[in-house]
Image (cartoon, grey):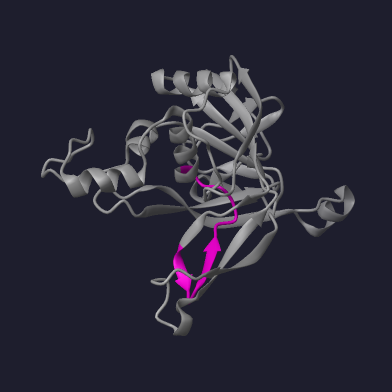
Amino acid sequence: MEVIKFNLGGRFAFFKKPEVNSYLYFTYGNIHRVALLGIFGAVLGYKGYNQMDFLKRYNKDFKEIGEKGEYQYPEFYSKLKHLKIAITPMEVNINKKVQVFNNSVGYASKEQGGNLIVKEQWLENPSWDIYVAIEDEEGKKLAKALLGRNFVYIPYLGKNDHLADITKVNLIKDIGEANEFSNINSLFLKDDFQFIEYDEFDTLEDDINIFKYEEKLPMGLEEQTNKYEFKTLIFTNNNLKKVNEVRVYRVQNKNIVFI
């Protein structure tokens, strides 16, 4: 197997959660699979949500149409949803900061003066190592575009004023499975692994500082509504053992799991 690896980062990122508390919009703590597929779609020039809405309104042809004529997915998701991706955060907990905006267009608010105050929670200086398995033509096209820095659209981190920095692009060949491992260096599905607990003596003797990040993140889109489908993912340095038939790969001294 071949893998394309790169670092993805930026000054800020905002991966909006569907839940809204008044006018405060929260972000997920890490980039998720659907957002990554959107970035890949921008790199390759595939249509997104906005183009899909346009086609639906004007009843024009769209490549992904269901049996009853409903439009199913945005083009980027239809073409790329099968890709195997691994995500390694550079920090356990990425800093978050709330930003405040004034939206003063006349239709923004029914309040006096028409001014709407919006608050968004942004990730500060996020960075991830991303791995993508190259197993078909779409994977090859993505790898070629990343290596040649030939992007059709500008990729961004959840919002078009958060430009994405894609650096350290590297093609890695002959990736094999890790027959033995103690921990995983990427995000993984909670249901696939079980924690091996340390006792107090081991922790003190080896000076082990255990960290754990856990969050329900979007893993896909629901077919009829295009709403997020969620699964719980974990990032930790704790020792683990497999409880499902999941494959662990060894890449440049890192144990990763594709999701």
Q: Name the residue nearer the viewer: 154 or 197.
A: 154
Residue visible at 56% across and 47% down?
Answer: 31
Q: Is residue 26 rendered magenta in the image?
A: yes
- Which residues fall within the magenta stretch? 18-33
Question: Residue 167 appears at what percent x and percent y?
Answer: 66, 30
Residue visible at 70% across and 58% down?
Answer: 95
Lateral position of residue 48 relative to residue 59, left or right:
right
Q: Name the residue nearer the viewer: 199 or 151.
A: 151
Q: Is residue 165 above or below residue 11?
A: above
Q: Is residue 212 above or below residue 156?
A: below
Count of picture labels: 0
Question: Residue 73 appears at what percent x and percent y?
Answer: 29, 42
Question: Residue 157 appears at what percent x and percent y?
Answer: 56, 46
Q: Is residue 178 visible?
A: no
Q: Is residue 123 above or below residue 113?
A: above
Q: Is residue 169 rendered magenta in the image?
A: no
Residue 9's image quarter? top right
Q: Name the residue nearer the viewer: 124 or 247.
A: 124
Residue visible at 39% across and 32% down?
Answer: 80
Looking at this rendering, what residue extends furthest in the left direction? 68
Lateral position of residue 116 relative to residue 197, left or right:
left
Residue 241's image quarter? top right
Residue visible at 46% across and 18% down?
Answer: 140
Residue 67's image quarter? top left
Lateral position of residue 237 relative to residue 144, left or right:
right
Looking at this rendering, what residue extends furthest in the bottom direction? 112
Q: Is residue 9 visible?
A: yes
Question: Residue 62 appears at what percent x and percent y?
Answer: 22, 36
Looking at this rendering, what residue extends furthest in the top direction? 174
